[in-house]
Amino acid sequence: MDEAAFITALRALAPDPAARGLDDDVAVIALGGEHLVLTHDMMVEGVHWLPGQDPADVAWKLVATNLSDLAAKGAAPLGVLLGYGLGGGEERFLAGLAEALAAFAVPLLGGDTVRRVGPAAHGLTALGRATHCPVPTRSGAQVGDRLWVTGSLGDAMLGFEALRDGREGRTGRDTTRFARPVPRLAEGRALAPLVGAMMDVSDGLLLDATRMARASGVTLAIDSAACPVPPDLPSARRQEALSWGDDYELLFTLPAGTTPPCPATCIGEAQTAGPVPLLLDGACPQGPLGYEHRG
Amino acid sequence: MDEAAFITALRALAPDPAARGLDDDVAVIALGGEHLVLTHDMMVEGVHWLPGQDPADVAWKLVATNLSDLAAKGAAPLGVLLGYGLGGGEERFLAGLAEALAAFAVPLLGGDTVRRVGPAAHGLTALGRATHCPVPTRSGAQVGDRLWVTGSLGDAMLGFEALRDGREGRTGRDTTRFARPVPRLAEGRALAPLVGAMMDVSDGLLLDATRMARASGVTLAIDSAACPVPPDLPSARRQEALSWGDDYELLFTLPAGTTPPCPATCIGEAQTAGPVPLLLDGACPQGPLGYEHRG
């Protein structure tokens, strides 16, 4: 069974669309007057990180990517649970985990360890408390809204390539944005009361924007020249940067005329739903839009 | 690094002993006037289930074992998040997952799927709402308390052997207790207001009782003849049954004279801490006490 079919079948088992996190990575449930936000991500060696990459970076990224899902909901992290496949690299993993937990002020609440057979695979569950209700979704974009993104897009791609090609470090390119992404927690909390729709850019701007457009029932029109990219990105690679994942920036919509409370760039607008959910410079973008989950 | 050293190092990263679930599988955190109970377990092919075993049973067990952790806290399940390694057997896994979710009336809230490389590995996070505060722990046994256990111990062992040896099914032994354990959710809720200490028996009675004794600062004295075992267990295998895991019964203490509100068997008592945490028929038990996590 391929991954898309499996996810579709899983969705049929999640009876409450409002609670389930299968279609937008994050579950929201009400409890005792609060809204609890939950997410679980797995990472596998050779799929989500380069074989031989520092396990400290793996630990960091496992925490950071889950917290990025909370950030997109404007949630304050309450803690994480770790599922760890034991079989080497534990010292460095622990070092990176400690650094990430301290950097994001999030406690380790518990978890499980198992002996691994084959490549390393780890899982992490993060939970947080919503700071604003209604909790932002990817389905709230309205026609006329402006589309914004925090930070820049493409640093993770350039960092990955430098790390893969051994060009990282002091004399090479900074690979921090790929190896040690920082979830936009403060920005997410500041934006939550204001946004129409919000999500993090984990699989590529063009793919994630397509998902937002579909969920919201609009067409999102993006101006590629307005998209913030790293200064050293070759101009011919702009669309590639916009379809590369791992940036963990926040993509959100605001009503026209509203200024975001944090640094961000306006990259487009929401239009009446047309034949395609996404327009890039007025046309349907060609080529891959981002990292698609495949079987 | 071996598993014990890794877990010790993880514990040092979990600053709040009251919140962390590393030492007793389950984390408890306060939120909005409620107490949230969280647990995460991973299962790996060839470690936690037999290669070739029906993926439907694997899915059931993944849900059941996590809910058993909630049962030991007297918690009502709120939902589960699945981390699934995709690579075959999805149809049967989905069937078993649907059966377990329906049987225990627990919603699937979300999760993640990844392509697997090597043996299958899946993780599940379960969360629940405590129905009684303080939430039962394994550290509450007091000298003079009686030690009780629900159900019987050894059915999972006999079921595992029958399944391994192809003796299951209509003409063979019932393997349900191994393949499809049922978490004692109703019993856990009924017991929570009454118990001194409570935990589930997942790694073997003798090992889990040792953990309860150590956490509580008592010696637990168990009468092996009083322990409930399956009628077809050879008498020579009684201690083996008491050190085999996977039974998912509840082990708990009650003050002397208190009758449990659910079917259970009194198997011993809590005594002043002696030189060893566990006495079996008055002596320190020899041989393995249960399934130890090893590196």
Image: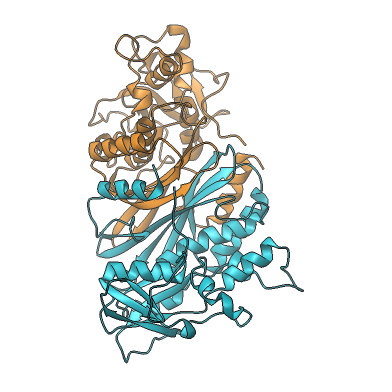
Chain colours: A cyan, B orange
Q: Please name the residue shown 55% across and 61% down the image.
A: A61
Q: Is residue A17 left or right of residue B139?
A: left
Q: Nearer the viewer, residue B291 or A141?
A: A141
Q: Outermost residue, bottom direction?
A: A257
**In the image, residue A114 lies at what x, y percent?**
54, 39
Q: Quadrant of residue B265?
A: top left
Q: Using the image, determine if residue B273 lies above or below residue A185.
A: above
Which quadrant of the rendered structure holds the C terminus of chain B? top right
Quadrant in the picture for the N terminus of chain B: top right
Res B196 visible: no
Q: Is residue A202 above or below residue B76?
A: below
Residue at 29% in and 41% down: B192
**Vertical placement of residue B209 versus A252, above or below:** above
Residue at (45%, 42%) from the top-left corner? B122
The total of numbered circles placed on residues is 0
- Please give left or right for residue B21 compared with residue B169 in the image: right
Q: Is residue A225 left or right of residue B195?
A: right
Tell me residue B235's x, y (percent): 43, 7
Asked whether residue B253 is in view, the answer is yes
Say which residue appears at 53% left-offset and 24% top-offset.
Answer: B289
| Depth order, front residue of A280/B154 | A280
Rendering coords of residue B3 (x, y %) = 60, 40
Residue in front for this viewpoint, A52 or A92: A52
On the image, the x and y values in percent for residue A119 come to: 59, 43
